[in-house]
Image: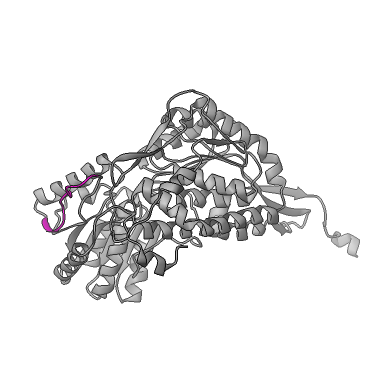
Amino acid sequence: MTPPQQLAEEKSVDASAHLEAVPKQLFIGGQWIQSSTGGGPLSVEDPARGHTIAEVADAGVEDAVAALDAAVAAQPAWAAWPPRRRAEILRRAYDLMVDRAAALAAIMTAEMGKPYQQALAEVEYAAGYLRWYSEEAVRVNGRFAVPENGAGRIVTMGQPVGPCLFVTPWNFPLAMGTRKIGPALAAGCTCVIKPASQTPLSMLALAAIFEEAGLPPGVLNVFVSGSSSRTVGALMKDSRLRKISFTGSTEIGRLLVRQSADQLLRVSMELGGNAPFIVFPDADIEAAVDGAVIAKLRNNGEACTSANRFYVHREVIGEFAEALAERFRSLRVGPGLELSSDVGPLIDATQRTKVADLVRDATGKGGRLVVGGGIPDRPGYFIEPTVVSDVPEDARVLTEEIFGPFAPVVAFEKEPDVIQRANASEFGLAAYVYTKDLDRAMRVAELLETGMVAVNQGMVSNVAAPFGGVKQSGFGREGGPEGIAEYLETKYVALNAGTPPTTEAIR
């Protein structure tokens, strides 16, 4: 990591040398190769300035199939590797990520836009999955049991599901990769990865790290494609693929689930969110505001776990909204590579327009603009951190995922009412609850229809915990001991041995 005192002496981070060092080809079968289609490269844009910072190879269907060919060929040998050897590869990759955190963070900020310090935090978080699953690799267990009639024995074992396809998003370009790669490799699965075309450089840099760590050729393969529907669609039809894990929009997730049915693939889906942030009247308001800033503005608000709807008790809504607005007002909006920036740009013009439209809809229907809402007059896709209070129930922002720095605040009076309103969403990924009453905290956490609940804290993600949602937020879990189970099939062996002697024989 870059020492804090060194960062304090600098005003910005120069990413140019790090961007230049990233391989720009496809990584297939342990080789860096050009696309076989002969088409033009894909441009990678800096969202803070709106110009191209790199060009990468654009894969076609033949390249995607070649990546799966390599994963299939490598699968038997990788599954047969001793768990400790697989663990050592993951641990070496972890060490390399930590050693190169400054370079990886600069690359990530340049292509995605988040503030550099947050990118450093993501590198640490992403690397943590490799460390965690290096430790889980040696703990894949089965069971031995005596059946109820005493005849024979029951033996179960966990075996790798086989070649996997990972489709990762642009908002956390490293962490969403390692959260899948770590458990897959630990379990003995090979993989093909298609990162988002907006942010491919982080994943290509990670592939180079795995290559240096000694990962055998074909175990991990990466292709970038401007035609995701064609390349991913071709792999989904291939009977050799055994699992897909996708992080992204619910709309695309539904499509992939439908496509997975033909091959009966194992499926993990981490999809959209509409997280409620509930502040009860007994809450520590200062702590709630601190948590709200994290839950709303982390990653520029572009996170599926981002607080989307702020339900604040009527007794404290004025105090909370004004305090939150004051915190938002104090933040500097600017390019992520400028170390004084607290909030960076959104990923592109389309996303900025969507957020601005949601703000206009909320205020146009009677919401009170407390702070922000404007678009700075500068290059890049910036929008001011925004708080709108007294948002009406028919505002679009209460049903649509925001993915930007906009906090809509709504009043409530009764606990049953706020639980009903919080659950009145097709999504069910995360929720946040602030209260000093432990009984209430547990009661509300159990009643909320979400896969994760954060109590009195603005961060829910943890490498040691299962990440995932319910309803239209998807299914399957990533992280923690639960994460590796997604990459294991349970095999049962009926063993005709160990049967005790009969009663007659004993006599």
Instruction: Where is residue 300? Give x, y as percent.
Output: 30, 54
Q: Residue at horizontal 43%, vertical 30%?
A: 41
Q: Is residue 413 visible?
A: no
Locate residue 371: give its quadrant: bottom left
- Identify which residue is drawn at 46% across, 50% down: 174
Colouring method of the image: one colour
Front residue of 6 and 415: 6
Q: How many marks?
A: 0
Observer-nearest of 275 and 258: 275
Magenta: main secondary structure: loop
Range of the magenta residues?
368-379
Foreground: 71 or 245?
Answer: 71
In percent of width and height, residue 282 lies at: 24, 76
**For residue 76, above or below residue 150:** above
| 375 to the left or right of 236 | left
In the orientation shown, which residue stands out farthest toward the top? Answer: 38
Q: Is residue 223 located in the magenta-colored stretch of the structure?
A: no
